[in-house]
Amino acid sequence: MTQFSSATPRVALLGCLAAPLAMSSPVWAQHFKMPDPVIRDAAAPTAALDARLPRPTTSFGAATHDGWVYVVGGYTGPPHDYYWEAQEADFYRVNLHDRSHIEYLPHHDRLQSCSLESHGDALIRIGGMMAQNGRGEPQTLLSLDTVTCFDPADKTWSNPLPNLPEARSSHDSVVVDSTLYVVGGWSMDDELRRPAWHDDMMVLDLEDPSSGWTSIETPFQRRAIACTTAGNHVIAIGGIGSDRSMSQSVDLFDRETGTWSRGPDYPGVAFGMAAEAIDGRIVASGADGQIYTWGPGESTWTHAGTLTFPRFFHQIAVAGPEDAFFVGGMSRGVRPTHLERLQLGSVDTNATCTRLTIPSPMPSKNRQAMFLHDGWVYLFGGNTSTGQHDFEPENFLDDGYRLSLATLNWEPLGDYPHERQTIQTCMVPEGGIYAIGGFGHDGEVARTWTEGYRYNLETGTWDAGAPDLPISRSQFGLTQHDGTLWIFGGLDYDPRREKGDQFRHLLEVVSAPAGQDDANFAYEGVTMTGPRRAFAGAKLDDRYYLIGGMRENFQLVEDCEYFDFETRTFHPIPSPRDSRLSAELVALDGRLYLAGGTTPNDEGGFTPNTSIECFDPTTNQWTIVMEDMPFPPRHMRMMPHRGRLLLFSSHVKDTDTVELAIIDPGFPELASAMTQVEDLD
């Protein structure tokens, strides 16, 4: 039996594919189909160079056989609106040891919601559902009773097994020894007003298929379940019941006694989930992206990891006693093409990284307003140049775009109200997304600005329902605490003022309530301990941390501190190994991660800093997470995303691409070596 570490196992993102995707989008959005990304994967020493699904899909059958995961059928259209054009006849296999090797196989049936099992030298496809209607026609869905076999050696289909006694879809199945079990599901027919829910498990002896199917009553009627095996039990997990309620039940069928019993309820979202047995243990995941394991005799499930992209109606492929791959599925309205790998054994304490170079439609090269919401990176404005001081009117932009992290496709958005860069953004729970200040050209000079705007995610538009600044600023820190927006530091710049007064470093900390249209930022008696702009800032618990930056006369700020929101006072903290200008700081799992920016060099200039450092407030110490980031950090942005660090840079000269990296920082307090990230060809 696999021994699980007490630390969380690593889930590595392995690959992706930019491909067309049918999905519901706001009326203001138009979908971009971009060329494929270039994937440079350094997720683990044995990681594949490339791991792509040919097509993002849900509700497909999958089985692992002889080191390959086989995928058949699936659906690519909008959820709950089924038509035959979006049901796929795809049948292909992906080599789990060399994920760049994908082979298409013969198959002609457009279907979804079938199951696929491996037995001996064959694959068995069971049931499924076909849409009889075309797009826009009244929906007519038909469950199937067919059972057909594929021979991977000669790549042919045959029908040596009897069909199901009744049609079945939205079910699952498992082969134990030489017995096939088909559990759950329902039967749909255009002549029936309502689907017929199955209350039995169908059993077939694969050594003697002529004996036919046997029906065993189940203590449940559920579909969209996961079925697997452990010990001497067939196990049915979760799903939705005939009363339309979601179930977290775990039902165990004892193959020796022929009786059903209950296991501990599944602790996560158990609809459209996937489960597989690995070395005697069950590994399962549902729509919340949490991964749990369970073994016979245990009273509770054990949390084993978190997927970068939560998904349901997906599958799990087993590659070995400690390896599981999560394939396909739906993630918040989009379908991930990434394979994610869960390693269940010993935990690598070093950071791991996957880097992608993605074609981009954006004219902006840096300094965009940016925020992350629901698996999308939103970007507005910015500068067209990769130069340091290109501030002509034509350099400033108001364009808006968003990038799906699940599919790596782009959508254009409504423009920002002004052509501007270095706008600071902040998301307030249930209060919207706010964008404040920034730097732009007024037709005469490039200067800082005071305006604030609020973004409506439903309409995709900006409005003026955000507080304005009393004094124009850029290069400041913006955060929210308990529904109040706070601004720290920054620069008021206007080249029309007298020489020596063009740069004004602002010491007044200002705040404003979020969600009040008539409120503006105001000074409430809190003053910075000294000038600081272009610094790294992040809120963790009741503190806002300020790292590095620049003060008067273009001198670096080497001291670091935090602001306590309860006492409204500043307190010093140790400085990181390297002094940094324009770095990024992210709060993640109770720690702070510092990355990017530039550091002084021996020649009196600045050198891009490629390291990632971690600060632990409980120990008051910094550690090095990674010495070499996956791409040059100039104007790089960093955000937390599902327990990982998301790095983004559009500062790419001569090509219309952006750089993206997802970094699992590992366990800095345990790491004994630095992770070197390389580009793999």
Image: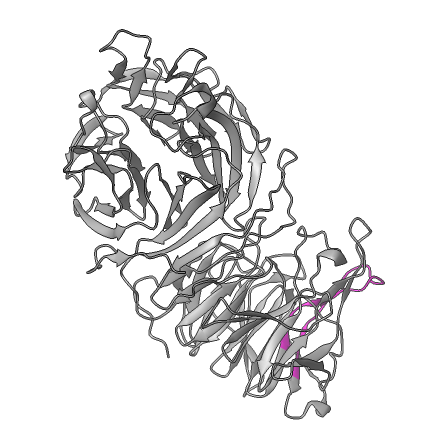
Confirm whether residue 71 shows in the render.
Answer: no
Judge left or right: residue 532 versus residue 219: left
Of residue 271 and residue 371, the one placed in the foreground of this image is: 371
Judge left or right: residue 148 versus residue 408: right
Residue sitting at 59 percent across and 66 percent down?
225
Confirm whether residue 193 shows in the render.
Answer: yes
In percent of width and height, residue 134 lies at 80, 54
Q: The C terminus appears in which quarter of the rendering?
A: bottom left
In percent of width and height, residue 323 lies at 42, 71
Judge left or right: residue 120 versus residue 211: left
In percent of width and height, residue 661 lies at 39, 50
Residue 65 lies, with reference to residue 111, above or below; the image says below
Residue sitting at 54 percent across and 51 percent down?
407
Residue 185 among magenta residues: yes
Of residue 188 and residue 417, the one placed in the foreground of this image is: 417
In percent of width and height, residue 338 lies at 50, 58
Residue sitting at 34 percent across and 13 percent down?
471
Specify the segment rendered in magenta: 182-203
Give the mark count. Answer: 0
Residue 563 lies, with reference to residue 86, above or below; the image says above
Q: The N terminus appears in which quarter of the rendering?
A: bottom left
Residue 167 lies, with reference to residue 213, above or below; the image says above
Residue 285 among magenta residues: no
Residue 370 lies, with reference to residue 292, above or below; the image says above
Residue sitting at 57 percent across and 35 percent down?
412
